[in-house]
Image (spheres, helix red, strand yellow):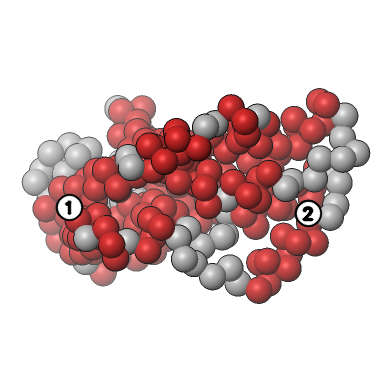
Amino acid sequence: MEATVHWGVWSPALLLGLVGSLHCAGMCGPLVLVLPARGWTPQGWVASRIVYQLGRVTTYAGLGCVFGLVGRTLVSAGVQRWVSLGLGGLLLFGVVWRWSGIWIRGGWITPGWLARGMHELLAERSWPAMYALGVLNGFLPCGLVYVAGAAATASGNLIHAILFMLGFGLGTVPMMLLLSLAPQKIPVSWRIRGQRLVPWTVALVAVLLILRGLSLGIPYLSPNLGNGAAAPCCH
């Protein structure tokens, strides 16, 4: 039963990460392409890119812990289902009214401390620096991360929130790793077509959040959240 519950958390997270990575290729792609290249052996160069991705996923898992704690607080306050309904409604509204969807198109401002830290790390040639650069990359303002965070918070469960953000992060790795190792293998046309799928994936997450908030008593999909109770969980 535990595996079933966890797969119910992983599947939408992985889907959001996989489809959303096509959006990430356009937003974070330039950073990946300027990662330090000189001074590495061929094997070290590949490993450094993997270490960079590991740092990014670590940040998402850490954020999942924060979102999970917030969600657990909402459960204690008895407002989890209303938050889930509200977040789902906002996401769905943003998809329907795409022209207002700044979280899809970008337009975020990178904090100064974050930009300075990444600039300093880009000048280094070490695996710790690559890992730290990936960690900082995970904090870059990104609408899709906020969508994943909304879903993680609405779970109302610390473990599920961490798993959701971890699944989202892992879902973005294949595209981002391919972009850093062989950027010429990803035609621009693929990215454009793929980005058209992003709103549909966000809409799916929004519907799942709304279903959860409706508390229909459907196991895993819309569990009973009456009186602010958390969804059944096995661990």
Give the quarter of the image for residue 93. bottom left
Mark closer to the chain start, 1 or 2: 2
Residue 105 visible in the displayed image:
yes
Q: Residue at x 9, y 46 (%)?
A: 216
Amino acid type, mark 2: Leu
Question: In screen coordinates, is 133 left or right of 36?
Answer: left
In the image, residue 231 above or below residue 172? below
Residue 231 visible in the displayed image:
no
Between 5 and 112, the one lying in front of the other is 112
Q: Residue furthest left?
A: 216
Residue 16 x, y percent position in the rendering? 38, 41
Q: Residue at x 74, y 46 (%)?
A: 35
Question: In screen coordinates, is 198 left or right of 66?
Answer: left
Disc 1, SS: helix
Residue 49 x, y percent position in the rendering? 71, 37
> Residue under circle 1?
210
Q: Residue at x 49, y 67 (%)?
A: 108
Give the quarter of the image for residue 182. top right
Residue 122's tag is: 2
Local crowd size for mark 1, using a 10 Å CA cut-off: few (<14), some (14–19), many (≥20): many
In the image, residue 19 above or below residue 88? above
